[in-house]
């Protein structure tokens, strides 16, 4: 029998244990081992029932990611589960830790299920552009009903053991030791003579078609462009319309279709890139790097960003000192914290007691001295080098030795900020994205002298507070904003040349972004964008400075949604409409600058918005700002709304072909006579050698 699955006869009960650390992935060896173990139990006349349990780390987190993209290896999980379910002897799944994806499908193939109180279960395949492919879409609705199954399968929702008990997904909870409880449960089944209960034999009650129609409508609105959620709905619908075997065939056909689809390949790439981003390559070989303890966090600045950062730590149960010199600003900041939590509570995402607990973890103060014992202090003040250096000089004097000092800067040179202290090795950037308590990305920026332990701590902290941390090095704008600047530049230039805000926004929206650059500007605040532009005027080219459309809109007091007007006009419900005043402003601007307006195609808009970004990504790799192309993709997927079904800008570039991007850059270099369009050396070399960002 395969070593990854053990068989231990405990009297008349066989204990079958999956032992494939770290997550008991269902590798080919595990699948073979499970099938062999069940057959052994069936053939052994002394065995009356079998308990299937996972090793110490959990039941099973599902498929082995090392098999992603490879030809299927026998036995298929679908067939192994069939062996389990067809057993004439009761098979009990004892679930601890996680039972996800194929892991839960294995449990569904068992005749009974018990779980430890801390177990979690789910079918999250949709997040990889797939659907459960081993009977999950057919068994789950038979067991817990169509509506609950749709939520778990279409949304990839993970449920607690307590919720699973209510749904009927598990038969009982094991508050003590799971293994002992499972063996007792199995003995009870044998003693009672209770027959095996095959989920595939249960009736799937027909559901009102409006349930499926409502889910389709929701998916088309919230998961626009994604194929997998729609296939998940269709598969569950098949469970209500077809016999089990036919439904299984329908599920398998759709699974294979999705597995071969570009979308699933992109989403699997995104998943693997996110996992890889958590590792810092040049630190792998260094043993015992360790991390620094973080028991108290300080945040300097109680504006929108500072309060959002404070909430991140409070949400994770970490006490936070929120320091703001101005008492009125501090009170406004705390009011914003309470407002944000109240909004979450109103949606049912938080109880009053939990809200009070989190608010209590944020300790407001006007005194910088309160930061003296903080292990980590994050500065979130105005984006100006001199202002931040002043704050860091203060922190260097007040904070204890060994405390980490982090800047939330989105552009500035971390090394210059570190120069303001006598501890540059403890300084780094921690770039949160607004709103900080919502957006998942954390761009950690290591300076030239930042200690490995400090970098490792920042990455660990990112995970602790529920972020996706990516480590980058120092450059203007780091990864995300440096690339975004290229898209922003071309968007404004195309306004001058003949495009309209709504045309550019629609092209990028149709591509898959949540919104285009001008709708985003109105949402974030035209005044915010204007302040950023003013702080960077010295770095702009003469044409970039002359393209002052944003300045003109700002001068009119049109600050976006909050004032009812920006690039668009907004009604009381913040629904936007095209504003002729802005169109006239843009046309007049072009006329004053002697730029002849022309029709700009959607294809040109997409190329000019995306290809300079891809080119800049190649430069970031050239310069060593990031270690992997996947880090760039993760930044854009988690921080800038790049559609996951396209995998990120560099994965997308590989899919359309690097020669396509390269030739377009050369074309625009000729058209505009501008070295801005010159392809990066890395991109040129890859095209000439037939290579890609990803092999």
Image (cartoon, grey):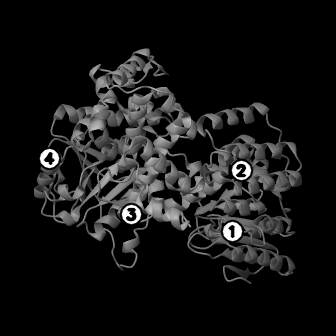
Most foreground residue, 516 or 348: 516
Q: How many marks?
A: 4
Viewer-nearest of discs 3 and 2: 3
Looking at marks 3 and 2 on the same chain, the residue that comes earlier in the sequence is marked by 2
Viewer-nearest of discs 4 and 3: 3
- Residue at label 1? 70
- The answer to whether residue 31 is visible is yes
Distance CA(mark 3)–CA(mark 2): 54 Å
Decide: few, some or many residues near mark 4? Use Cα within 10 Å; few <14, some 14-19, many ≥20. few
Decide: few, some or many residues near mark 3? Use Cα within 10 Å; few <14, some 14-19, many ≥20. some
Viewer-nearest of discs 2 and 1: 1
- Residue at label 3? 622
Decide: few, some or many residues near mark 1? Use Cα within 10 Å; few <14, some 14-19, many ≥20. few
Most foreground residue, 470 or 307: 470
Judge left or right: residue 259 versus residue 36. Answer: left
Looking at marks 1 and 3 on the same chain, the residue that comes earlier in the sequence is marked by 1
Viewer-nearest of discs 1 and 3: 3
Judge left or right: residue 310 versus residue 33. Answer: left
Distance CA(mark 4)–CA(mark 2): 60 Å
Residue 530 in which image quadrant: top left
- Circles 1, 3 touching at the beta carbon (< 8 Å): no
Q: Which mark is residue 386?
A: 4
Q: Residue 380 carries which label?
A: none
Distance CA(mark 4)–CA(mark 3): 30 Å
């Amino acid at each position: 029998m395969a070593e990854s699955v053990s068989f231990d006869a405990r009297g008349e009960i066989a204990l079958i244990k999956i032992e494939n650390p770290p997550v008991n992935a269902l590798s080919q060896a595990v699948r073979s081992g499970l099938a062999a173990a069940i057959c052994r139990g069936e053939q052994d006349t002394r065995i009356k029932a079998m308990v299937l349990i996972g090793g110490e780390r959990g039941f099973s987190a599902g498929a082995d990611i090392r098999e992603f993209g490879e030809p299927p290896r026998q036995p298929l999980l679908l067939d192994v589960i069939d062996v389990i379910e067809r057993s004439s002897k009761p098979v009990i799944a004892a679930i601890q830790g996680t039972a996800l994806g194929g892991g839960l499908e294995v449990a569904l193939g068992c005749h009974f299920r018990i779980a430890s109180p801390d177990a979690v279960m789910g079918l999250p395949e949709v997040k990889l552009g797939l659907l459960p492919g081993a009977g999950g879409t057919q068994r789950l609705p038979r067991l817990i009903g169509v509506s609950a199954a749709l939520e778990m399968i279409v949304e990839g929702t993970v449920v607690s053991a307590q919720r699973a008990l209510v749904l009927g997904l598990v038969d009982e909870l094991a508050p003590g030791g799971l293994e002992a409880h499972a063996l007792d449960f199995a003995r009870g089944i044998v003693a009672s003579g209770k027959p095996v209960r095959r989920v595939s034999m249960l009736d799937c009650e027909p559901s009102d078609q409006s349930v499926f129609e409502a889910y389709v409508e929701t998916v088309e609105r919230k998961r626009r462009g994604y194929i997998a959620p729609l296939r998940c709905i269709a598969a569950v619908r098949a469970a209500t319309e077809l016999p089990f075997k036919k439904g299984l065939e329908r599920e398998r056909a759709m699974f294979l279709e999705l597995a071969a689809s570009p979308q699933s390949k992109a989403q699997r790439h995104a998943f693997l890139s996110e996992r890889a981003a958590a590792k810092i390559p040049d630190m792998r070989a260094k043993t015992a790097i360790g991390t620094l303890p973080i028991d108290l966090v300080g945040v300097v600045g109680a504006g929108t960003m500072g309060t959002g950062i404070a909430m991140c730590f409070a949400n994770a149960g970490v006490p936070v000192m929120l320091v703001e010199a101005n008492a009125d600003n501090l009170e406004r900041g705390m009011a914003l914290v309470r407002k944000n939590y109240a909004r979450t509570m109103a949606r049912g995402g938080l109880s009053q007691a939990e809200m009070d607990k989190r608010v209590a973890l944020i300790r407001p103060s006007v005194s910088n001295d309160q930061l003296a014992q903080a292990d980590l202090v994050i500065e979130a003040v105005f984006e100006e080098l001199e202002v931040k250096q002043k704050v860091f000089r203060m922190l260097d004097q007040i904070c204890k030795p060994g405390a980490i000092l982090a800047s939330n800067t989105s552009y500035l040179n971390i090394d210059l900020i570190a120069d303001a202290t006598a501890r540059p090795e403890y300084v780094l950037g921690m770039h949160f994205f607004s709103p900080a308590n919502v957006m998942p990305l954390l761009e950690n920026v290591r300076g030239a002298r930042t200690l490995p332990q400090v970098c490792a701590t920042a990455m660990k902290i990112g995970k602790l507070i529920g972020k996706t941390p990516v480590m980058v090095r120092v450059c203007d704008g780091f990864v995300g904003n440096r690339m975004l600047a290229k898209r922003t530049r071309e968007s404004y230039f195309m306004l001058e040349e003949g495009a309209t805000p709504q045309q550019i926004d629609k092209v990028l929206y149709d591509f898959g972004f949540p919104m285009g650059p001008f709708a985003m500007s109105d949402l974030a605040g035209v005044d915010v964008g204007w302040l950023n532009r003013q702080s960077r005027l010295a770095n702009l080219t003469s044409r970039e400075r002359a393209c002052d459309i944003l300045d003109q809109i700002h001068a009119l007091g049109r600050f976006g949604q909050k004032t009812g007007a920006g690039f668009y006009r907004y009604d009381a419900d913040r629904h936007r409409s095209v504003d002729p005043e802005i169109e006239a402003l843009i046309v007049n601007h072009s006329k004053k600058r002697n730029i002849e307006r022309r029709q700009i195609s959607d294809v040109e808009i997409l190329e000019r918005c995306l290809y300079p970004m891809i080119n800049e990504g190649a430069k970031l790799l050239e310069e060593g700002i990031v270690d992997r192309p996947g880090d760039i993709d993760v930044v854009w997927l988690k921080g800038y709304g790049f559609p996951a079904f396209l995998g990120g800008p560099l994965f997308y570039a590989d899919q359309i072909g690097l020669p396509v991007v390269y030739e377009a850059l050369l074309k625009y270099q000729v058209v505009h006579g501008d070295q801005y369009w010159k392809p990066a050396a890395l991109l040129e070399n890859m095209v000439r050698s037939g290579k890609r960002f990803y092999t």
